[in-house]
Image (cartoon, rainbow, N blue to C red):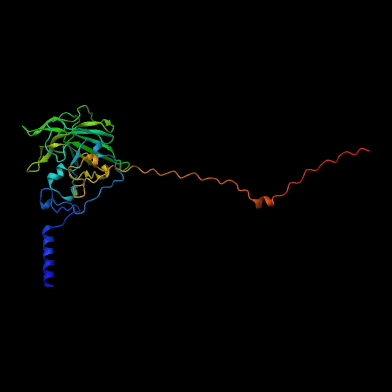
Amino acid sequence: MRRLAVVLLGLVWIAATIGPVDAAGHGSVGPSGDQSLARPASPVQAATTHASFRLDSITCCFISANFLDPSQGFSPFNCLTNTGVNLSVTPRGTIDLNGPGPAVRLALQGTIIGFLTSPDPASTLSNSPAGSYGVMVQLADPLHAGQTIYTVYSDMGQFNTATNTLGQSFVNQSLVDNQTYPPGTVLGNQGDIFATPSSMFTPIWAGEGTQVHVAILKLPVESCDNALDPSPYVGTNVNFDGAANQPGTPLHLLPPPPAPQVPARPPAPRVPAPQVTSSSSAHAPARSAAPRAAAPQIG
């Protein structure tokens, strides 16, 4: 009995040391190992019944980084740069291209309301694509009738390593402010620049692997408290947790959204034909024979 008590105490000590583990077997630490960046203990599964567009309709090829829920209290670094989903040209977001990457397309019909030109996502939008690295689009919320949402497509530019600033813009320069465009419109190309806070949390430019950043917003400002979880819109879990599609997941392997269920038309009721039975014919009145005329008498 004493030996069993010692074993149980040892197991309790090991569990307390390791900490909680999520559904994928990850310990309660963030991506950098900092305990303050702990992942959510209970990942929220995406609703897949109302998906409105797929990530591979925007660009190719892989998920580079997933959505970070601002309510989870992550660091300002993640809050500023990852309020949406990063889609990259390589599985792990390595720096691999010196020019424009794959094309970036509009997912749903929407109206361009401005272009991102400053590393501060909350800055005023420009009405010209010149010198921009992103596009802000207004559209009808496909999941909530009568409501408006905004999508931002950013990181479409070249990082100038000599000046640590935005170099060439990869945004489609023929786009026009306040113009409505159909889905599939080319917005630009994946780039290798993104906005990041400095040591004083002041937004600055930085370089990374070729990618595009896509976010769904309540208001036309890419801020920490304004992001919507893209999962219900794209039909797969893109939350930053152990149950999400992990970085390196090919976009074409994501589960397709279910086809809409069209209710079957009920068959038209058949009108039964009138039934003639022997009993009914037995009770039917007999037809009387027509009277025969008497033959004339000759005599």
Q: Measured along the vertical axis of the image, is residue 97 above or below residue 45?
A: above
Q: Which residue lies furthest to the bottom in this view?
A: 1
Compared across the picture, whether 288 is left or right of 280 comes to right
Q: Which part of the image, by quadrant, shows the C terminus?
A: top right
Compared across the picture, whether 76 is left or right of 142 comes to left
Q: Which part of the image, by quadrant, shows the N terminus?
A: bottom left
Give me the residue at 11% from left, 63% from top.
Answer: 13
Which x, y percent locates residue 284? 69, 50
Compared across the picture, whether 138 is left or right of 204 comes to right
Residue closer to the observer: 7 or 257: 7
Give me the residue at 21% from left, 40% from top.
Answer: 250
**Looking at the image, can residue 17 be seen?**
yes
Compared across the picture, whether 120 is left or right of 145 comes to left
Which x, y percent locates residue 194? 13, 37
Which x, y percent locates residue 296? 88, 38
Residue closer to the observer: 148 or 277: 277
